[in-house]
Image (cartoon, coloured by chain):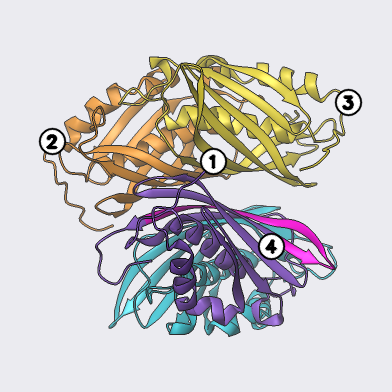
Chain colours: A purple, B cyan, C orange, D yellow
Amino acid sequence: MNDPAPKDPDFDARVRESFARQGLMETLGASLVRVAPGRVEIALATSSAVSQQHGFVHAGALASIADSAAGYAALTLMPPGAGVLTAEFKINLMAPGVGERMVARGRVIKAGRTLTLAQADVFAIHEGREKQIALLTATLMAVEGREGVSS
Amino acid sequence: MNDPAPKDPDFDARVRESFARQGLMETLGASLVRVAPGRVEIALATSSAVSQQHGFVHAGALASIADSAAGYAALTLMPPGAGVLTAEFKINLMAPGVGERMVARGRVIKAGRTLTLAQADVFAIHEGREKQIALLTATLMAVEGREGVSS
Amino acid sequence: MNDPAPKDPDFDARVRESFARQGLMETLGASLVRVAPGRVEIALATSSAVSQQHGFVHAGALASIADSAAGYAALTLMPPGAGVLTAEFKINLMAPGVGERMVARGRVIKAGRTLTLAQADVFAIHEGREKQIALLTATLMAVEGREGVSS
Amino acid sequence: MNDPAPKDPDFDARVRESFARQGLMETLGASLVRVAPGRVEIALATSSAVSQQHGFVHAGALASIADSAAGYAALTLMPPGAGVLTAEFKINLMAPGVGERMVARGRVIKAGRTLTLAQADVFAIHEGREKQIALLTATLMAVEGREGVSS
């Protein structure tokens, strides 16, 4: 998408405040790395606390940071007051999650009034080298005027 | 699927031992409720530790227990020594995750030699009533003879 | 879903008229078999006109009848005047499409005001025996008041 | 993916011969535009023969050319003698298919020994302008030594 124009000048603060309320991100040890119009990056430090049975990072942990990265990328382009909910996502796992750090980079593919399509690429960083290990596509829904659902 | 016949008589112990090694499940507070041929159920106690920004259970947490439920349902039908990896999954979120407890029920749709298709229905249990809130479909891959990947 | 109640008493005629306008269905040789509240069945006669390179029915042809079956299942529960559009679908292919006839059975999983989740099971009928060969899940959007989009 | 190296020097002829055997592509009026290592482009002339009920191109027709584009992109990187089958795909529809011509551009994201992940971007060309209208991600399986399944 070219030149996405945020409808909310405070999009950065809005995403950071919302992220801070996601208890799951803190539980997993995930952090917000970057917020830009239509793009959000989230990192996860690898440990046995997020592993599956073979010691790789669990697909669910990768999906969690990728879903948040895609969802917040969508939120950067939504009008003030709108909340974002995930309608669905699909994740393809291309290689095991092995490395010191996992990074999910979300970006908006198409921002619509009701539905936004976003994608997140997930990379494993191992000894300073990046390798793509997963690809997520998500449909995000903008929710306006529903009690308890904003940002 | 009718009458799935486990190829490994010890499928129950195998799933339980593998689940115990999934660090993410312990971190999330998830527990293994039921193991049967082609079917596995995993529960998650709701708390702010697994929430998204509006206080609902995070889609990533629901995806995590649903992916494990589908993956272990697949593993119950795999031969001894085979490991299971998720190739991809898609999850549709139908309603917000609100309630005391979330339950993911995985079941095998088609068990193949290399690829298994499984589905997981996710329910929120609120004041004793069950409501379906998500549906996951996953492609699981049986991995044999790869170092570090068994069960 | 239990007891889906159609909001449009003429849902049957509405689906049949809409189906008749789908040029693709006629091109493929597909026919509408059954319309009921929340459920629609579409059949496809097998021929080389819908094949892929090995002579199996092309995944795109299976996806076409499954998408229409899921979409029309959703439409049976929408209010008069609303049009239905597919936001996304995923299809898992479980076995090659081999047989005289392919049948897609769509059913609504969750009917919402804006978004409906539906599933379609696809079967191959070969020498009188049915075998499930594909599973589709779709997100359908109800569109109201957009010019050119109704039923 | 950088510098994908075809394992089969005759990948171009192999894709073209296989495409010519896909009866569905001829039925839809689709044509093979471009074959390169890891990339294949397929075009579809718009007509009422591929429409849905509102006159837009049917999601199933878009999925058909996108699935073939992704599948053949995968085939360009497979060893001689291997056949390609679609295990699953997901397609997100971003805008109605309106225009004289639809184009699906498939590309390989990750080529594995058994499974390949590919993506196809679908564009509508209307009065000389291109607009992306759909995004497909697919898991393709390389099949070797199965009777009747090659290329």
Secondary structure under tag 2 reads loop
Name the chief secondary structure element in magenta. strand
Badges 2 and 1: C-beta atoms under 8 Å apart? Answer: no
Chain identity of mark 1: A
Vertical placement of residue A59 versus A38, above or below: below
Residue B139 at x, y = what percent? 60, 55
| Whether labels 3 and 2 share one chain | no
* Image spot of residue D120 (x, y percent): 60, 36
In the image, residue D75 above or below residue C120: above
Name the chain under label 2.
C
Tag in front: 3 or 4: 3
**From the viewer's perspective, is C61 left or right of D42?**
left
Q: CA distance from mark 2 to mark 4?
A: 47 Å
Question: How crowded is the residue under tag 4: few (<14 C-alpha within 10 Å), some, or many (20+)?
Answer: many
Q: Are the residues under badges 3 and 4 in a single subunit?
A: no
- Label 3 crowd (10 A; few <14 / some 14-19 / many >=20): few
- Residue type at numbered disc 2: Asp
Q: Is residue D88 magenta?
A: no
Q: Are marks 2 and 4 on the same chain?
A: no
Q: Residue B140 lies in what quarter of the image?
A: bottom right
- Please name the residue that numbered disc 2 is placed on: C10
Q: Residues within 10 Å of mark 1 (few under 14, many from 20)?
A: few
Amino acid type, mark 3: Pro
Q: Where is residue C14 shown, x and y percent of the image? A: 19, 31
Question: Marks 2 and 1, Cα distance to the nearest angstrom?
Answer: 44 Å
Identify residue for label 3. Answer: D9
Nearer mark to the viewer, of 1 and 4: 1
Q: Nearer the viewer, mark 2 or mark 1?
A: 1
Q: Report which residue position mark 1 lands on.
A: A2
Disc 4: which residue:
B85
